[in-house]
Image (cartoon, rainbow, N blue to C red):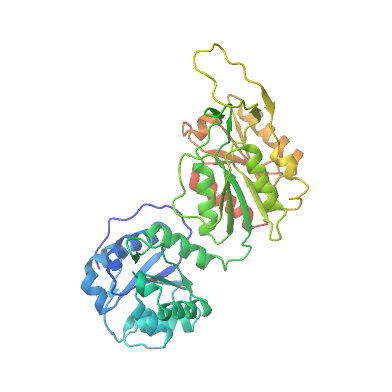
Amino acid sequence: MVEDTGVATHSRTLEGKHILLAISGGIAATESVKLSRELRRHGARVSAIMTNSAQKVISPLAVSWGSESEVLTEWKSEMSQLGKFDGVILAPATRNTIAKHVNGITDSPVMMALAAASGNGTPILFVPSMHEDLFHSRTTTDLIKELEKSGHGVLYSETEEGKRKQPNPVSIVAFFSNFINRELPQRKRVSITLGSNREPIDSVRAIHNTSSGSTGWSIAEHLYRMGHQITCIAGHTTISPAFPLPDVRVSHTSEGMLGLSMDLANSENKPDVWIHSAAILDYIPEKKPGKRASGTGNWELTLNPGPKHLEELASLVNGSIQIAFKLEVGCTEEELVKRAQNLLRKHNLSAVVANQLHEALGQSDFRCRIVTPKGDATHVLDQMELCESIELLISSN
């Protein structure tokens, strides 16, 4: 085994889980080092196993370095591939390997490992990677249907350069985390608003408030990794999520975001949890048609109060877990907590994430505080702790 220098911790969503990374002989096997390290960034202990064909694409030495484990490449008497794992990823999953698994062929340690995992109910994620013409053949379609019928996960990318290339490691690990964590108790349907509003004052100009969407995306990503079913209602954002989330609905205006939330609240599978992290405009300008010419002197704008989302949604989300955000500028700690408690009582919320602008900008020793109906105001050090605290609140109710 080659000693690694370690990886940064991005989350603990796979902490305590032993994952088997099985590698077959597609060219995407070259991504195995990155994939191994990404698994470890989220707390997983990784064991790796390779087919003979995979070893012609990438050396076991490189995979050992990335996974920080011995790599199984041939039959051994202890049959470690039959060990108990918390999950298995086959990446890349060639059509040949998929066909062997579906038809019960166990002619290598990799095939034996897949058969054993399938037999004992271990979650398996197949990541097909092949040319587009192979992917769309009737045989491949039938094979993938058989995998899904057996309860296995299947993840593949859109077509690029005539190929179904392997998704990037971040997307694979995020999908896999959701796939194995969705069986945890108290998984919820969660709606989260994020980003800011942008309201036009004429055909080419607009006013908006300050929010990049970073906090909202981080919370959504973490909850998705933890197995919750996430719907994002996104306003104007200046950054993108780290990986494609399955359900993102976009409107840059306050009324547009409220409309999307109302539609979701009236749907058959309405959320169990509402996280209101978006920076909603409190005042909305009256839009003027056309473009105001430059150099025409002062411009007086009329700002009218905008809709209050918590009030508008109240009757539709009664009984749900609701978490709101409260941002203030220049007030004392005591006053900030008091305002958060008032917001809690007014809207019967489960918690309020309260902070001041300098904290949100990273100019403080802590990120925010979470205020609950019990009167607690717990300080949160950083974004990861905030995400974990919100997930704990959701899954314990």
| Residue 330 in which image quadrant | top right
| Residue lying at 39% horizontally and 83% vertically, measured from the top left | 99
Q: Quadrant of the N terminus?
A: bottom left
In front here: 119 or 82?
A: 119
In front here: 304 or 12?
A: 304
Q: Quadrant of the C terminus?
A: bottom right
| Residue lying at 37% horizontally and 84% vertically, measured from the top left | 100
In front here: 89 or 207?
A: 207
Instruction: Please state if 62 lies on the left or on the right of 322 as rendered.
Output: left
| Residue lying at 66% horizontally and 21% vertically, measured from the top left | 302
| Residue lying at 53% horizontally and 12% vertically, measured from the top left | 296
Residue occupying the far right of the picture: 315
Q: How many marks?
A: 0
Would residue 120 be visible to someone looking at this image?
yes
Residue occupying the far top of the picture: 297
Would residue 371 be visible to someone looking at this image?
no
Residue 64 locus on image (x, y percent): 27, 67
Residue 44 locus on image (x, y percent): 41, 63
Location of residue 244 with respect to 152 vertically, above or below:
above
Location of residue 255 with respect to 153 vertically, above or below:
above
Residue 376 locus on image (x, y percent): 66, 42
| Residue 167 in which image quadrant | bottom left
Instruction: Please state if 173 lies on the left or on the right of 298 as rendered.
Output: left
